[in-house]
Amino acid sequence: MTHNFGLHFTQELVQRYSFFPGGLAQRYPFLPKEWPESTEQVIPFFVIVVNALGTDDAMRWFDAARTAHRSVVTADEAGTHQFGFAAYLGKEIGIARDPSLAIVAAWEAIKALYEITCRDARADVDAYFECALRACSRGSGRLTSSPGAAAATA
């Protein structure tokens, strides 16, 4: 993979969680120990999703995950029955009945990062997905298709 998603994601998190305005955040990021506790644990799971799917599909999944999270929150706030994050996510992305190994890896990674994030009271699930979307959209070295599709055409 040529896209350095992990680095870009970390930079987006610095911008999101920094106490400094604008460009000062890049020069003086606050210490990682002040980030939500889940940050360190979820970064590898976000990277798995991008590595498995490529940036374009990962962006679609992160957007779907954000929508699924909002469905969970809306149902919880309304006190109505909800089917859980995985059910809403499956509906949003339309997972196939016999998914590839890459899809399974991304699916399990996104469920894991969601579970970890939700258990951290200081974490903002929407902010994590927004940072992931912005990291994917950074131009340098961006993959335009999934690694599996590139291998199939080689």
Image (tube, rainbow, N blue to C red):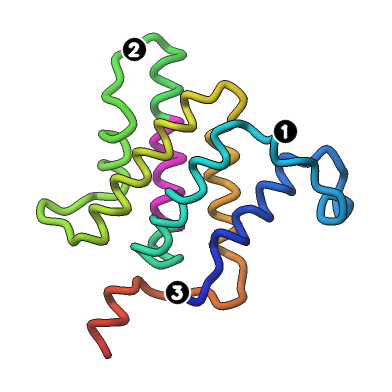
How busy is the neighbourhood of tag 2: few (under 14 within 10 Å), some, or many (20 plus)? few
Identify the residue shown where x is 34% and y is 12%.
80
Identify the residue shown where x is 56% and y is 68%.
4
How busy is the neighbourhood of tag 1: few (under 14 within 10 Å), some, or many (20 plus)? few
Q: What residue is pinned by disc 3? A: 1
| Amino acid at dot 1 | Glu
- Of 96 and 25, which appears nearest the observer? 25
Q: Secondary structure at mark 1?
A: helix
Name the spot of residue 53 as percent of width and height, x first. Answer: 35, 63
Q: Quadrant of residue 98?
A: bottom left
Name the spot of residue 117 as percent of width and height, x first. Answer: 49, 32
Q: CA distance from mark 3 to mark 2?
A: 42 Å
Image: 45 above or below 7: above
Identify the residue shown where x is 61% and y is 76%.
140
- Of 18 and 83, which appears nearest the observer? 18
* Mark nearer the N terminus (3 vs 1): 3
* Mark nearer the N terminus (1 vs 2): 1
How busy is the neighbourhood of tag 3: few (under 14 within 10 Å), some, or many (20 plus)? some
Looking at the rendering, the stretch of residues picked out in magenta corresponds to: 59-70
Q: What residue is pinned by disc 2? A: 80
| Amino acid at dot 2 | Thr
